[in-house]
Image: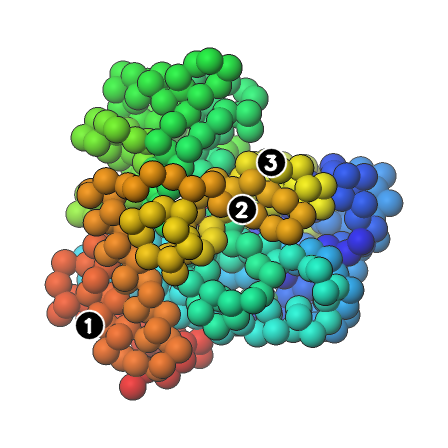
């Protein structure tokens, strides 16, 4: 049984392979293949992955390749995590937006739309390559961002693809909330949730008869932030906690999430909503000359690649250089659930088809689903109320228009998508940002006429 990781050179690859190796027997996996278009970057990550598998005494064979046929032939699972344009373009997305006074973020607002326009067609190419070579009953589990836009594009252009789009943020929020209220066993916190990717709400959170939602509401009110006490203390002292969600640039997000819970007390928001509901505050808090892309390059990316160089020079490795945890576990557990027909609940992104009755069928909705061997079965909910419906409809229209604009090569549609995004105050600003982004993305975007 073969698992291929697309974007093998990703900073998340070592963590994901660790999660796979820990589940080797349940998955029955015999080979992990890394595939990337940047062979040099990937070969360095391959050094760490090779070391991890040996260190874990894993029987899994490792193949590192830039050849599609070698990568996909007979693969059962494809774990996708490509970052088209890499951190250099993420930095552009963030900085161009901020220069024009709007949210500059990897997946939200103008930055997310720019990243979407880069990623749609490489994802379609990947789906076609996978269909050509992989096992007929393969599954593509996709983390590649911006997952909301990617999901719409795949649904429009390749509706029969065996792809499940996923995000680690709901599970990361559950883990963080678990830490705040003292629950270690966070995967057993039972939740209801609805929304679009990076645009959703938890409507219920329970654990062994405890109302976790009520507990976290009280915690947020007391502390004014949705981070556990140890992270708050470490941040005050400017210490790293090892949890990337508690890095300096994420603080505003967790603070705004607590504020949002006070203002809209019914549900617990996905932290990404803070970009849409506090756009002004987010821009004011951001440094247009030093964004999250810079922080990631200076921390996660630097630690990994310097760690490889040190290992090659000295034979010693520092396990802290690779990120593991909820991110890798989530995708590997999803693969286990698909194989085992366990009917376990996972929050995933799929076509709505009436599961949220008052949203369009073609909405790519993020909802809990039962995972069966035939794929996910979304768990339907009651109609949603006006505030949430209105927010989702606007964002959904924005993302659909963007994808239509990309497919048709329509400048007007893409401009309208930018103008429709809640983080953008006027169509003139939308145009300024878009025109600068067209220049910066010449090597990546479809031509817009
Ligand atoms: P990274 O830049 O370290 O790794 C991405 C890799 O993708 C690079 O090695 C790059 O060469 C490769 N790549 C680019 N275009 C490709 C293509 N067309 N085919 C194959 N490989 C290609 O980035 P990272 O920070 O490790 O993140 C990897 C991806 O995972 C990003 O898309 C990121 O947004 C996503 N991510 C998603 C979630 C989620 O919740 N959905 C969580 C974490 C990361
Ligand atoms: C969360 C989100 C991902 C996003 C990541 C960014 O995990 O769910 O979609 O890619 O954060 O993290 P970074 O450390 O790269 O800013
Ligand atoms: Mn995500």
Location of residue 345 with respect to 408 vertically, above or below: above
Q: Is mark 2 on a helix, strand or loop?
A: strand
Location of residue 90 with respect to 297 vertically, above or below: below
On the image, numbered disc 1 is attached to which residue? 431
User: Mark 2 and mark 1: span between their CA atoms?
Assistant: 40 Å
What residue is at 46 percent from the left and 60 percent from the top? 151
Q: Is mark 3 on a helix, strand or loop?
A: strand
In x, y percent, where is residue 250? 37, 39
Location of residue 328 with respect to 104 vertically, above or below: above
User: Mark 2 and mark 3: span between their CA atoms?
Assistant: 10 Å
Image depth: mark 2 or mark 1 in front:
2
In x, y percent, where is residue 254? 33, 33
Q: Pointer 2: residues within 10 angstroms few (<14), some, or many (20+)?
A: some
What residue is at 42 percent from the left and 33 percent from the top? 192
What residue is at 45 percent from the left and 30 percent from the top? 191
Q: Is mark 1 on a helix, strand or loop?
A: helix
Of the pair 182 and 358, the residue shown nearer to us? 358
On the image, numbered disc 2 is attached to which residue? 377
**Is there any visible trace of residue 10 in the rendered image?**
no
Residue 344 image label:
3
- Residue 423 sits in quarter: bottom left
What residue is at 51 percent from the left and 67 percent from the top? 159
Left or right of 340, for residue 279: left
**Quadrant showing the C terminus:** bottom left
Of the pair 340 and 251, the residue shown nearer to us? 340
Instruction: Answer with mark 1 or mark 3, whichever residue precedes in sequence.
Output: 3
Q: Pointer 3: residues within 10 angstroms few (<14), some, or many (20+)?
A: some
In x, y percent, where is residue 29? 79, 48
């Amino acid at each position: 049984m073969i698992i291929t990781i697309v974007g093998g050179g990703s900073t998340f690859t070592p963590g994901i392979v660790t999660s796979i190796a820990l589940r080797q027997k349940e998955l029955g996996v015999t080979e992990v293949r890394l595939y990337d278009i940047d062979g040099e970057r990937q070969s360095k990550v391959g050094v760490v992955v090779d070391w991890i598998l040996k260190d874990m005494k894993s029987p899994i064979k490792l193949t590192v390749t830039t050849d599609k046929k070698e990568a996909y032939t007979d693969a059962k699972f494809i774990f996708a995590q490509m970052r088209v344009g890499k951190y250099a373009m993420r930095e552009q997305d963030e900085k161009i937006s901020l220069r024009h006074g709007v949210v500059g973020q990897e997946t939200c607002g103008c930055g997310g739309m720019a990243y979407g326009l880069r990623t749609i067609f490489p994802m379609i190419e990947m789906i076609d390559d996978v269909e050509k070579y992989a096992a007929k009953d393969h599954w593509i589990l996709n983390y590649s961002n911006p997952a909301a836009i990617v999901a719409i594009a795949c649904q429009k252009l390749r509706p029969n693809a065996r792809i499940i789009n996923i995000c680690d943020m709901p599970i990361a929020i559950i883990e963080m909330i678990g830490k705040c209220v003292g629950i270690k066993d966070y995967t057993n916190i039972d939740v209801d949730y609805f929304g679009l990717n990076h645009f959703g709400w938890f409507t219920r959170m329970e654990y062994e008869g405890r109302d976790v939602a009520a507990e976290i509401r009280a915690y947020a009110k007391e502390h004014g932030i949705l981070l556990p006490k140890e992270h708050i203390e470490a941040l005050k002292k400017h210490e790293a906690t090892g949890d990337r969600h508690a890095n300096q640039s994420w603080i505003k997000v967790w603070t705004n999430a607590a504020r949002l819970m006070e203002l809209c007390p019914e549900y617990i928001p996905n932290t990404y909503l803070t970009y849409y509901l506090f756009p002004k505050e987010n821009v004011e808090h951001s440094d247009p000359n030093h964004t999250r892309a810079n922080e990631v390059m200076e921390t996660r990316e630097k630690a990994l690649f310097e760690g490889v160089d040190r290992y090659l020079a000295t034979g010693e490795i520092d396990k802290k250089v690779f990120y593991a945890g909820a991110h890798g576990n989530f995708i590997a557990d999803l693969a286990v659930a698909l194989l085992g027909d366990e009917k376990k609940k996972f929050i995933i992104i799929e076509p709505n088809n009436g599961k949220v009755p008052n949203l369009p069928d073609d909405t790519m909705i993020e909802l809990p689903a039962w995972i069966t061997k035939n794929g996910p079965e979304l768990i339907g909910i009651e109609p949603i109320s006006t505030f949430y419906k209105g927010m989702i409809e606007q964002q959904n229209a924005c993302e659909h228009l963007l994808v239509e604009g990309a497919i048709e090569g329509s400048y007007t549609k893409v401009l309208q998508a930018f103008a429709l995004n809640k983080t953008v105050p006027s169509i003139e600003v939308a145009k300024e940002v878009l025109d600068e982004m067209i220049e910066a993305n010449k090597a990546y975007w479809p031509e817009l006429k």
